[in-house]
Amino acid sequence: MTKKPLYLASQSPRRRQLLDLIGAAHELLLPGADEDAEALEVERQGELPADYVQRVTRAKLSAARARLLARGLPPGAVLCADTTVALNRVILSKPRDESTAQVMLEWLSGRTHRVLTAVSVHDGRRAHHALNITKVRFAKLPPAVIAAYIASGEPFGKAGAYAIQGALAGWVESIDGSHSGVMGLPLFETTNLLKAAGVPLALAP
């Protein structure tokens, strides 16, 4: 029997690497030029971080499934994810510019924040969902470190203005939860979702 493909509806190279790590063969299912993918990530006034990240992920899944049908691709499972950074109830999205990145990093300096990653998988019949919440604490970030990090360009395109696997990793004092979740795809939850969807994995029974 031919195995159905797994489609990853994400442009994140880190999510691709993490799926490779657990042996989940996949193909990309990216938005076309006619889609406004950024519009799905617009925050709603008063929305809590957990509600936001789960709503956005489910909206991405709906858009990806419509894309799959419109393109006439072979049926298969579709995986979507979204990651947000929250300081208390405040959502720290991707920085617009250098000044926004500086403000975010100054807020995170010497404090504990949450990284929330929602994952959704549709197996062709129904959707499976999970949410991972991990606490991350940065040591006090000297102004020179923040300036150098911003100059590197790494904060841009990243929720909370940083990448856990990047140059700022040496300033992470502690992580309580999932390192892969902070990277953008919590592997424990993702593995369970893919197993429930019948997707073959390297070490799944």
Image: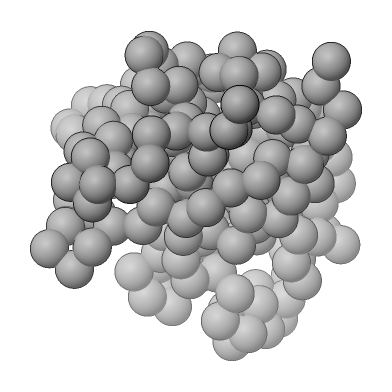
Is 199 above or below relative to 66? Answer: above
Q: Position of residue 158 (x, y in %)?
A: 51, 60
Q: Nearer the viewer, residue 44 or 99?
A: 44
Which quadrant would residue 199 be assigned to in this image?
Answer: top right
Q: Nearer the viewer, residue 107 or 64?
A: 64
Residue 20 appearing in the image = yes
Q: Would you say 169 lies left or right of 57 here?
A: right
Residue 135 appearing in the image = no
Quarter of the image with the N terminus in it: top right
Q: Nearer the viewer, residue 34 or 178?
A: 34
Quarter of the image with the C terminus in it: top right
Q: Residue furthest front?
A: 1
Please name the residue shown 40% across and 64% down the image. 95
Is 74 above or below relative to 123? Answer: below
Q: Would you say 90 lies left or right of 145 here?
A: left
Please name the residue shown 85% across and 46% down the image. 173
Please name the residue shown 79% across and 39% down the image. 22
Please name the residue shown 38% across and 22% down the image. 124
Which quadrant would residue 17 be assigned to in this image?
Answer: bottom right
